[in-house]
Structure formats: C-alpha cells, structure tokens
Image (cartoon, helix red, strand yellow):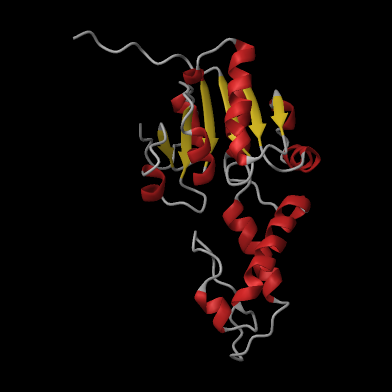
C-alpha cells in the first residue's frame, strides 16, 4: 500500500486572542481578587480567592465565604468578561507568546489574530507587548461560530488547502467550531481546559507551551527548551 502524501507546509498561522495570546487564567484570577473585595466575608477569615488553575468559577468556597448568592453569578461572570475585554491593563500576556510571534515573523508565514474582542483593544494590548508589527492581519468581533468562515476566506484568498493553516487556541468552543474544517488545530493546555478534555475533540496537536508551535511548522526553538511534549 502506498504511503500517504505528506501534509502540506503550513503557510498561515492564526492565533486566538483570549486564552492564547492573553493568559486568561491569570487575568481572570486578577479580576476575581478585585471583585471579592466588593463582597463581605461572612466567615471572618482573611482568605483570598485561591489561584484558579483551571478550577471552574465560582468555586464553592467563594460562595460560602461571601454574601454572593447563585442568582448573582451571571452578573459577576458578565462583569469579568467586560473587564477582560475593555480594560487591557488587566490583561496578562501568555509567557513566551511574544518570543514565538517574533520568531515566526522572521519566516515567510502569514501571521494573524482571530478574536471576538474589539480591534482597538487587541491592537493596544499587542502593541504594549511589542509584537503588533509582527502580525499581517487581525479579524476582530468575529463570533465563535463565524470563525470557520473567516479561516476559509483566508485560505481561498491565498489559494491554499485547509491543511496549510494552523489555528492556535486553548478554547474548546473554538476547537468545536473550527473542527469540522480542514485546518490544523494546535490546542494549548494552558487555558481552562486540561489535556484530557482537549483530547476528546481530536485537535491536530496538543501543546503545553506556545513555544511548541515552532517545531510544528519546522522552526527551531533556539536556545530555549520546549516545555512539555508535542503530541500529534
């Protein structure tokens, strides 16, 4: 039986914003710590909100130590999303993402960001991180289920097959939305979803660090070691 043809070279890399460029776990933690100050601690303790480490919000102990009731949860979640979207000073860059983007900018790849956040906020943040000039395009205010259409348009405009595009995200909802297309997906374990959860959606790759994008497209990581193992 003849061997399968080699995969086409990746020529476009698209990064998700929240959860990939932005460390959503740490950014959310920061917002929660500020929100907790608005609620009275009924236990008399001086505890602070624990590090999330992908623990679903609200953690039971948060409800037990404040005057926050279940019916208030949607309002709080909405407040968190507003803060993370509108106030870029509360956003924390994902470790190594700037290094990766700058390394890729030295290649012939086309680089871009696909996000539901406003373009002005995204541009402000990535320029603060000093890699805005490395990106070739930005598609903003794209709803989750509209992302496959944008990726298809990118491929059509470049006359490339789906396998030529690598989409980097840590969000399961994005993986589900894009999974039916032919693009390659690198799912990051640094978001709110653990490796076992990501595996159930069968992304092309599961990566533990943004630096693992480099060997996927055939680029060396330089003197920095890759954290974790790349899975295909």
Give the camera-side residue of 64 and 190: 64
Residue 133 can be seen in this image: yes
Q: Position of residue 171 (x, y in %)?
A: 53, 45
Residue drawn at x 47%, y 15% is 9
Q: Position of residue 203 (x, y in %)?
A: 42, 35
Residue drawn at x 76%, y 53% is 89
Residue 96 is drawn in which quadrant?
top right
Where 182 falls versus 95 (above or below)? above
Where 183 falls versus 76 (above or below)? above
Number of marks in the rendered image? 0
Residue 224 can be seen in this image: no
Q: Position of residue 51 (x, y in %)?
A: 54, 66
Q: Work out which quarter of the rendered image holds the N terminus and state it.
A: top left
Q: Position of residue 230 (x, y in %)?
A: 38, 35
Left or right: 139 in relation to 193: right
Residue drawn at x 61%, y 84% is 46
Q: Work out which quarter of the rendered image holds the C terminus and state it.
A: top left
Where 25 falls versus 122 (above or below)? below
Residue 48 is drawn in which quadrant?
bottom right
Left or right: 26 in relation to 199: right
């Amino acid at each position: 039986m003849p061997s399968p043809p080699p995969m086409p070279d990746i020529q476009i890399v698209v990064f998700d914003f929240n959860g990939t460029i932005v460390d959503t776990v740490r950014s959310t933690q920061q917002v929660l710590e500020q929100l907790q100050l608005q609620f009275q601690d009924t236990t008399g303790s001086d505890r602070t909100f624990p590090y999330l480490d992908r623990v679903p919000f609200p953690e039971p102990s948060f409800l037990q130590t404040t005057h926050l009731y279940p019916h208030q949860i949607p309002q709080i979640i909405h407040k968190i999303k507003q803060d993370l979207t509108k106030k870029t000073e509360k956003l924390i860059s994902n470790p190594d993402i700037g290094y990766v983007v700058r390394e890729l900018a030295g290649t012939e790849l086309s680089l871009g960001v696909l996000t539901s956040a406003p373009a002005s906020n995204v541009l402000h943040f990535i320029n603060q991180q000093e890699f805005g000039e490395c990106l070739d395009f930005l598609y903003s205010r794209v709803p989750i289920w509209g992302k496959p259409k944008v990726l298809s348009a990118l491929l059509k405009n470049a006359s490339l097959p789906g396998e030529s595009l690598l989409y980097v995200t840590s969000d399961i909802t994005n993986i589900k939305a894009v999974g039916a297309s032919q693009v390659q997906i690198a799912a990051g374990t640094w978001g709110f979803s653990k490796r076992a959860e990501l595996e159930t959606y069968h992304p092309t790759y599961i990566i533990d660090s943004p630096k693992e994008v480099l060997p996927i497209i055939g680029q060396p990581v330089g003197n920095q070691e890759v954290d974790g193992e790349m899975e295909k």
